[in-house]
Amino acid sequence: GMLGNINLHRTDRMTMAHGLEARVPFLDTEFTKLVMEMDPSRKMVCPDAVRNNARGREKTVLRELFEGPNANGDSIPTPVLWRAKAMQCEGVGEDWVSILQRKIMGLVSDAELADAAITFPVNTP
């Protein structure tokens, strides 16, 4: 499916390009079983929480697992643990969406975009 053909390949390419090897622990069947047994309401994203960077935002349950010190007394600083998610490309320092928008703006005029439905009646961009 999509997971193996796209996401894992992307992770593999990105890490191997820098001499790293990523592990994908969330594909573990026991972990998947545990998550599937959770109350679905605990996994729902609240739009207000996303806007206010509060509990209820993306990955709240996972973030809560890492709150406080571990057995060695180490902890993830709260601002890091609860910061807003970034797209995968932004996390590595490249905002591909902005790059693509700038490139397209130089290639497609407003008039061409306005006529897109005429030029491309099927699957209009």
Image (spheres, rainbow, N blue to C red):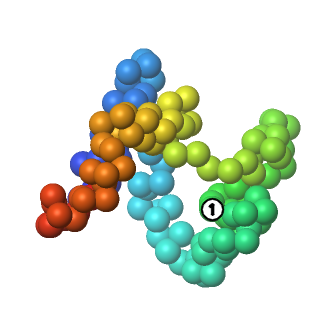
Mark 1 surroundings: few (<14), some (14-19) or many (≥20) residues within 10 A: many
The reply, left or right, for residue 6 in relation to residue 105 is left
Please tell me which residue lies in front, 67 or 17: 17
Please tell me which residue lies in front, 106 or 94: 106
Figure check: 21 above or below 43: above
Residue in view at x 40 percent, y 30 percent:
14
Q: How many marks?
A: 1
Please tell me which residue lies in front, 39 or 116: 116
The picture quadrant where one finds residue 115 is: bottom left
Figure check: 93 above or below 78: above
The reply, left or right, for residue 74 in relation to residue 37 is right
Q: In the displayed orientation, state which residue is furthest to the front.
A: 111
Please tell me which residue lies in front, 25 or 91: 91
Q: Considering the image in quadrants, where does the C terminus appear?
A: bottom left
Q: Considering the image in quadrants, where does the N terminus appear?
A: bottom left
Position in image of residue 73 (x %, y %): 85, 38
Position in image of residue 5 (x %, y %): 24, 48
Position in image of residue 85 (x %, y %): 62, 50
Could you say whether the residue bearing mark 1 is in a helix, strand or loop?
loop
Q: Which residue is mark 1?
A: 58
Residue in view at x 41 percent, y 61 percent:
29
Residue in view at x 48 percent, y 54 percent:
26
The reply, left or right, for residue 59 in relation to residue 105 is right
Position in image of residue 36 (x %, y %): 49, 74
Residue in view at x 63 percent, y 81 percent:
41
Can residue 11 be seen in this snapshot?
Answer: no
